[in-house]
Amino acid sequence: DVVMTQSPLSLPVTLGQPASISCRSSQSLVYSDGNTYLNWFQQRPGQSPRRLIYEVSNRDSGVPDRFSGSGSGTDFTLKISRVEAEDVGVYYCMQGTHWPRTFGQGTKVEI
Amino acid sequence: QVQLVESGGGVVQPGRSLRLSCAASGFTFSTYAMHWVRQAPGKGLEWVALTSYGGSNKYYADPVKGRFTISRDNSKNTLYLQMDSLRAEDTAVYYCASSWQLDYWGQGTLVTVSS
């Protein structure tokens, strides 16, 4: 199975300041069609997960532009340009290239 | 708008069975692959299974292979997860999610396996 490794696992942040989460995969996530299926999800306290970013860098509808994704191959990053109070929660990366699908351990973002 | 509503969770004894349902609306269900993902209490997300839009292709995580069966009824816009031979470690909130890349999620249904 593809192992997804996130760091850090806990991220204390300051409102208005940037934050960054790393996600590394044990195998390349480039699919045979040339696309890279790396997604980012946000789970606020007490809520279901919500997808923020798909295929490395594409923001979902309604996701603030302070969230951005980047990376390639096996190394990916989620960045929040200026953290807001509503960004508190756990963030997961997930690979959608190989079977079985696998998630990172999650990064808890707290103020 | 897209809605996914899970049901069927509850408390069940080890070794018994349970069937979860996920009612979909707001999109053309029959053209979307669908997933089940679970989350044990206080833990991270674990992918469980996927069915392709027509139901002909199915994939499972190793911990549930041979015990769980994913299926769908496109005439009823409903996804199912038949869970047999349940174990304590299957205790979790079970979410359904749509599309190959999990674009929408339901609110989840809690399954507790305990004697």
Image: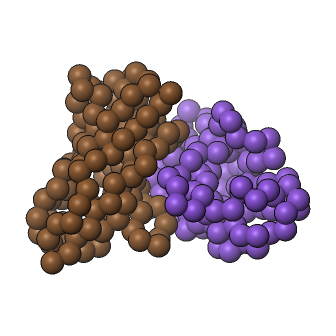
Chain colours: A purple, B brown
Instruction: Count up the numbered dots.
Output: 0
Location of residue B28 in the rendering, given as x and y in whole percent from the top left corner: 40, 21
B54 and B74: which is toward the camera: B74
Relative to A60, A69 lies left or right: right
Q: Quadrant of the C terminus of chain B?
A: bottom left
**Which residue is rendered at x = 65% and y = 44% of the image?**
A53
Residue B19 percent across, percent down from the top left: 19, 50
Q: Is residue B108 visible?
A: yes
Residue depicted at x 39% and y 52%: B108
User: Which residue is found at the position 21% from the left and 66% from the top?
Assistant: B11
Q: Is residue A35 above or below residue B42?
A: above
List x then y, in percent, for residue A12. Answer: 76, 73
Q: Which quadrant of the structure image shows residue B24?
A: top left
Measured from the top left, where is residue A67 in percent x and y? 76, 48
Left/right placement of residue B20 relative to residue B6 reads: left
Question: Which of the pair B77/A75 is nearer the observer?
Answer: B77
- In the picture as drawn, the residue positioned furthest to the left comes out as B16
Q: In which quarter of the image is residue A61?
A: top right
In the picture as drawn, the residue positioned furthest to the right comes out as: A17
Left or right, residue B68 beside residue A45: left
Q: Identify which residue is drawn at 34% across, 24% down.
A: B30
Q: Is residue B78 left or right of A66 when viewed as pictured?
A: left
Q: Is residue B68 above or below residue B51?
A: below
**Residue B59 visible (yes or no):** no
